[in-house]
Image (tube, rainbow, N blue to C red):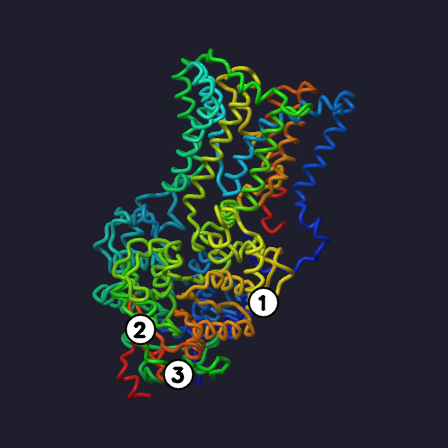
C-alpha cells in the first residue's frame, strides 16, 4: 500500500527507515520514500510534519540519525550539500540563495567555478551559465547581468538554473513558486514539465493544492515525521488528502470557552486595511475585549509580520489601527506599550527577542516596566521587588530565586518569564507569537489557562500559533492568513482541523464542504 | 552565543557567587605584582608609593569609566586619545581668556569632549555606523582640528589653578584630590549602572539589543547618552591630566586608549557587552597602573610595554570574552 512495486530495476532514489531528532523532538521517524526518474513527486504535510527535515537530509544539509539512502541501489551518505549535488541530488531552497551583487554566471557557478591555472575560467563559466539558463527556460537572462537587476521571477529561474548546472538527476524544489505571480508560475511549470520529460526526478514541496494537482505524478503525505501514504496523483480528493494530513486525535486540555457576549462597545483593537510591503495585504479585523482571537495558516504567510506591524516594529505600514475606537500611531514598541495603548507583544523567539539570558530573572522581569518602577530615572527597588514577587507567584515560575540568570531556567519557565515580563505592564491588548513552541505540555496547559483568565479579566488577545489544536482549543475566533491576507474567519464550532487546514491551503471552501 | 538550556548550576554561597572570577583574578594579580615589585625595591610597599600609584591610576580610572559604559553596550570608543587631548587643550585655551575663561575652563573642556561623544553617538545610534569606524573617524577629525588650532606645536596656554588643584591638591589631608575625584566618579557610575533605568538599559542593550527594543526601551537614546558620557569623561580626564602637568600637550591622550580598554576587559567586562561590574574596572585600572609602574622600574622600553598590553588583552579575551554563560 505504501510504495509502488519496484521489482525489476532499483528505483532512482530510495530512503529507508530514516530518522532524525533535534534534542528531544522527533523531526523524522522511520521515513520511507521512493523517487522514480521522469516523474514529479509531491510531498505534502502540515507545519512540522517533517518535510523540511526530509529535504535537508536528502540535500546533505543535515545527517540522519538512523536509516540509509540508496541512489540507484547503492548506499550513499552526504556530508554536505556540495557532496549531494555532486552525486546528483540538488535542492532549490525556499529562500532565494543568490548573491545580489554578483552576476548570473558567477552565481550559477559559485560553489564550483570552472578553473584554469587556479583562476576562474570566465569563458567556461559563461558557457555553463548559458547552458543551464537555456535548460531552465531563461534564455532571455544574460549571464553577465547582475542578480539585483533581475525581477523576482527571473531570479527564481536563475535559482533553478543554478541547481541544473550541477546536472542533477534529482531536483528538489522547496516552495519553488511561493514568491511568484501566476504568470511566472506557468513559466516555471512548463520548465519543470520539460525537465521531467528529459528524465529528471523532481521532488516538489508546495502548500498550493492546485499546483500539486497540475504537476504531480505521485504524492506522499507526511505527518508527525512519518510518511503516511504514497499514492498516484489524482486518485485522492483534496478532502481526503487533508484528512491524511491531520489524522490525529484531538486532546482536550483547554479551559472552557465562555459564551460570547454581543458587545456594542468599540473593539479593543481594530485594524483597517493594514499593509506592509509585499507581506501584508489589506488586513482588516477586530478583536473585542475579553476575546481570544487566533491567527492560523501555514508558517510564514505573514502572521509574524502582522504582529510586528501592530506592535510598531515595522516601518512603512499602510492602513490604520484603532484602539478602543480611537486611531493610534504605532511608531515604535515604546509607543505601542504606552499606557494609553496598552499593547504587549510576546515575541516568537524568547532567546533572541524576549529575554537577555545572562541577566537575572529580576532584571528581565522588570525590563519592560522600568519606566513605571522608577522616578527620575532611579529604580525603586522595593516597588520592583513587590511587583516581581506577585508575578512570580501568579505564574508559578520555578527558579532558584530571582537573582539567578534566566538562562539557567528550563524552557517552559523561561517562556513564563517572557509572558510575566509583559504582564507586569498590565496590558489591555496582548499579542502572542507562537508562545508555546518548544515547551513542555504542562507549561503549555498553564499558558492556556492563563490566556483565558486574562481574557476574562478584559484583555483582548491576538494569538498566532502553528499548532492547530491550540487554535481550536483556545480561540473564540480564528483568522486564517494566507499569502499576506486573511482568507477566512472561523468562529466557535466552525473551528475544526479540517476547516483550518483547508483554508490554510486556500482550497476552495465549497468543494471542501461537499467532500466532507 | 550558545544558548542551550543549561543544567541548574550548583549554588555556592551568595558572596562567592556574586564575585566574578575575573575580578578575583585581577585582584590576585595586583597582589602578585606588588610582591614581585617588592623584590626590586622595598619602597614598593610603602604608603607613599601606593598613594602615588593610586593618584596616577585616577586619571586612567576616570577615562576607563566612560569606556566601560560604551563597552557594556557592546560598542567601543576609539576616540579616547583625542577626546582626552581636546579636553585638556580646550580647557587651557579657555583659561587664556581672562577671569571668565578661568572659571569656565573646566566646563568648556568637558563640553568639547561631549561634542565628540555626541558625534559618535549620532553615528552609532542613528546612522548605524559601526562604532569602531565612527569613533576612529571622529578621533582623526579631533586630531586635525587640534593641529590646526595649535599649529602643530604644544600650546602655550597653561592650566588654571583650579585644574591644578583638582589634579594635585589635597582637600582631605593625605588623600590626593585626583583619587577623591575618581572615587566620586566611580560611585556615580556604580549608582547609575545598578540603580537607574539607564544602567539597566545599558546592560539590556549589551545583551540583546533586539529584546531591549521590543521591551519598549528607546535604545537609540541610551546609546547616544552613553557615548556622550564617554566623551565627557575622556575630556574630564584630559582636564585633570593638563592640571597635573600644568599644561596640555599634543599627544597627551595617546597612551590612554589601549590601557583604558585593557583595564575594562581585565576587570571582567565582556567585550561583547552586557556583562561586567565597576569593581572589576577599578581592579583593572589599578592592575594596569601597577603593571606600567613595574615595567618602568624594570626599565622596560615603551615597545615592550605595548607588546605586554596587547598580549594581556588577548589573553583576557580568550579567558573571559568567549564564555557569556560564565557568570
> Which residue is disc 2 drawn over?
A265
Q: Is residue A9 visible?
A: no
Query: Vertical placement of B177 versus A36: above or below?
Result: above
Among the 4 quarters of the image, the one containing residue A181 = bottom left
* Residue at the image position 48 percent from the left and 79 percent from the top: A254
Does dot 2 land on a helix, a strand or a loop?
A: loop
List x then y, in percent, for residue B255: 55, 24
Q: Which residue is mark 1?
A: A393
Q: Earlier in the sequence, mark 1 or mark 3?
A: 3
**x%, y% of residue A115?**
39, 44
Q: Can you say whether A262 is above or below A361 in the image?
A: below
Q: Residue at x 56, y 74 (%)?
A: A442
Q: In the image shown, does A215 or A394 lie closer to the viewer? A: A394
- Subunit of label 2: A
Report the disc number at residue A259. Answer: 3
Residue nearer the viewer, A77 or A203? A203
- Using the numbered discs, state the Cα–Cα distance from disc 1 to disc 3 in whole angstroms: 29 Å
Looking at the rendered image, the disc whose residue lies closer to the viewer, 2 or 1, is 2
Q: Earlier in the sequence, mark 2 or mark 1?
A: 2
Left or right side of A362 for A267: left
Callout 3 secondary element? loop
* Disc 1, SS: helix
Q: Earlier in the sequence, mark 3 or mark 2?
A: 3
Q: Nearer the viewer, residue A380 or A59?
A: A380
- Looking at the rendered image, the quarter that the C terminus of chain A falls into is bottom left
Label 2 CA crowd tier, 10 Å (few <14, some 14–19, many 20+): few
Callout 2–callout 1 Cβ contact below 8 Å: no
* Camera-side mark, 3 or 2: 2
Q: Position of residue A370 (x, y in %)?
A: 49, 53
- Asked if labels 2 and 1 share a chain, the reply is yes
B326 to the left or right of A159: right
**Numbered disc 3: what chain?**
A
Amino acid at each position: 500500500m505504501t510504495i509502488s512495486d519496484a521489482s525489476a530495476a532499483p528505483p532512482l532514489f530510495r530512503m529507508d527507515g530514516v530518522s532524525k531528532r533535534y534534542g528531544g523532538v522527533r523531526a523524522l521517524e522511520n521515513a520511507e520514500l521512493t523517487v522514480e526518474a521522469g516523474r514529479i513527486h509531491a510531498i505534502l504535510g502540515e507545519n512540522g510534519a517533517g518535510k523540511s527535515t526530509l529535504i535537508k537530509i536528502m540535500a546533505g544539509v543535515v545527517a540522519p540519525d538512523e536509516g540509509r539512502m540508496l541512489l540507484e541501489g547503492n548506499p550513499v551518505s552526504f556530508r554536505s550539500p556540495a557532496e549531494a549535488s555532486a552525486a546528483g541530488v540538488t535542492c532549490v531552497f525556499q529562500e532565494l540563495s543568490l548573491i545580489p551583487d554578483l552576476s548570473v554566471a558567477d552565481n550559477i557557478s559559485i560553489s564550483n567555478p570552472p578553473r584554469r591555472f587556479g583562476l576562474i575560467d570566465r569563458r567556461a563559466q559563461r558557457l555553463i551559465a548559458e547552458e543551464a539558463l537555456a535548460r531552465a527556460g531563461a534564455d532571455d537572462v544574460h549571464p553577465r547581468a547582475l542578480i539585483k537587476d533581475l525581477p523576482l521571477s527571473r531570479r527564481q529561474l536563475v535559482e533553478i538554473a543554478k541547481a541544473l548546472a550541477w546536472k542533477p538527476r534529482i531536483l528538489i524544489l522547496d516552495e519553488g513558486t511561493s514568491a511568484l505571480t501566476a504568470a511566472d508560475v506557468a513559466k516555471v511549470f512548463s520548465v519543470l514539465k520539460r525537465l521531467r520529460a528529459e528524465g529528471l526526478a523532481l521532488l516538489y514541496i508546495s502548500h498550493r493544492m492546485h499546483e500539486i494537482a497540475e504537476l504531480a505524478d505521485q504524492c506522499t503525505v507526511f505527518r508527525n515525521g512519518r510518511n503516511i501514504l504514497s499514492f498516484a496523483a489524482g486518485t485522492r480528493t483534496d478532502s481526503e488528502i487533508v484528512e491524511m494530513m491531520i489524522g490525529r486525535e484531538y486532546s482536550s486540555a483547554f479551559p472552557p470557552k465562555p459564551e460570547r457576549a454581543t458587545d456594542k462597545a468599540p473593539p479593543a483593537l481594530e485594524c483597517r486595511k493594514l499593509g506592509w510591503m509585499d507581506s501584508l495585504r489589506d488586513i482588516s479585523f477586530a478583536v473585542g475585549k475579553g476575546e481570544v482571537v487566533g491567527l492560523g495558516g501555514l508558517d510564514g504567510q505573514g502572521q509574524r509580520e502582522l504582529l510586528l506591524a501592530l506592535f510598531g516594529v515595522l516601518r512603512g505600514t499602510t492602513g490604520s489601527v484603532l484602539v478602543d475606537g480611537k486611531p493610534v500611531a504605532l511608531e515604535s514598541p515604546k509607543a505601542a506599550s504606552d499606557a494609553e495603548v496598552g499593547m504587549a507583544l510576546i515575541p516568537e523567539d524568547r532567546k533572541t527577542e524576549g529575554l537577555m539570558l545572562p541577566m537575572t530573572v529580576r532584571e528581565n522581569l522588570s525590563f519592560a516596566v522600568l519606566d513605571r518602577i522608577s522616578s527620575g530615572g532611579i529604580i525603586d527597588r522595593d516597588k520592583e521587588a513587590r511587583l516581581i514577587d506577585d508575578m512570580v507567584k501568579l505564574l508559578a515560575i520555578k527558579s532558584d530565586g530571582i537573582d539567578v540568570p534566566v538562562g539557567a531556567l528550563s524552557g517552559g519557565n523561561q517562556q513564563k518569564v517572557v509572558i510575566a515580563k509583559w504582564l507586569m505592564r498590565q496590558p489591555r491588548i496582548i499579542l502572542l507569537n507562537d508562545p508555546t513552541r518548544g515547551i513542555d505540555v504542562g507549561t503549555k496547559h498553564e499558558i492556556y489557562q492563563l490566556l483565558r483568565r486574562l481574557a476574562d479579566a478584559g484583555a483582548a488577545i491576538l494569538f498566532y500559533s502553528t499548532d492547530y489544536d491550540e487554535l481550536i482549543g483556545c480561540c473564540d475566533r480564528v483568522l486564517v492568513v494566507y499569502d499576506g491576507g486573511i482568507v477566512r474567519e472561523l468562529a466557535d464550532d466552525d473551528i475544526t482541523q479540517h476547516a483550518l487546514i483547508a483554508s490554510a491551503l486556500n482550497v476552495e471552501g465549497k468543494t471542501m464542504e461537499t467532500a466532507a | 552565543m550558545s544558548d542551550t538550556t543549561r543544567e541548574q548550576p550548583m549554588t555556592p554561597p551568595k558572596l562567592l557567587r556574586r564575585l566574578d572570577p575575573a575580578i578575583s583574578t585581577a585582584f590576585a594579580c595586583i597582589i602578585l605584582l606588588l610582591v614581585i615589585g617588592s623584590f626590586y625595591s622595598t619602597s614598593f610597599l610603602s604608603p607613599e608609593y601606593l598613594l602615588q600609584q593610586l593618584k596616577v591610576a585616577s586619571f586612567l580610572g576616570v577615562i576607563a569609566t566612560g569606556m566601560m559604559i560604551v563597552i557594556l553596550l557592546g560598542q567601543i570608543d576609539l576616540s579616547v586619545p583625542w577626546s582626552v587631548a581636546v579636553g585638556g587643550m580646550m580647557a587651557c585655551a579657555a583659561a587664556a581668556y581672562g577671569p571668565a575663561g578661568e572659571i569656565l575652563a573646566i566646563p568648556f573642556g568637558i563640553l568639547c569632549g561631549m561634542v565628540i561623544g555626541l558625534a559618535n553617538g549620532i553615528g552609532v545610534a542613528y546612522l548605524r555606523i559601526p562604532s569602531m569606524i565612527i569613533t576612529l573617524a571622529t578621533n582623526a577629525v579631533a586630531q586635525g582640528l587640534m593641529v590646526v588650532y595649535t599649529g602643530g606645536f604644544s600650546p602655550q596656554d597653561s592650566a588654571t589653578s583650579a585644574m591644578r588643584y583638582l589634579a594635585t591638591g589635597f582637600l582631605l589631608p593625605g588623600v590626593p584630590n585626583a583619587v577623591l575625584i575618581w572615587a566620586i566618579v566611580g560611585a556615580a557610575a556604580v549608582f547609575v549602572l545598578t540603580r537607574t533605568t539607564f544602567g539597566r538599559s545599558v546592560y539590556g542593550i549589551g545583551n540583546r539589543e533586539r529584546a531591549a527594543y521590543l521591551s519598549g526601551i528607546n535604545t537609540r537614546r541610551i546609546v547616544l547618552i552613553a557615548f556622550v558620557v564617554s566623551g565627557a569623561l575622556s575630556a574630564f580626564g584630559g582636564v585633570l591630566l593638563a592640571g597635573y602637568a600644568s599644561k596640555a600637550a599634543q599627544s597627551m591622550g595617546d597612551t590612554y586608549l589601549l590601557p583604558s580598554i585593557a583595564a575594562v576587559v581585565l576587570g571582567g567586562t565582556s567585550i561583547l557587552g552586557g556583562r561586567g561590574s565597576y569593581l572589576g574596572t577599578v581592579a583593572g585600572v589599578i592592575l594596569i597602573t601597577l603593571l606600567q609602574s613595574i615595567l618602568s622600574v624594570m626599565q622596560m622600553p615603551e615597545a615592550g610595554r605595548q607588546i605586554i598590553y596587547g598580549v594581556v588583552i588577548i589573553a583576557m579575551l580568550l579567558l573571559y570574552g568567549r564564555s557569556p554563560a560564565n557568570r
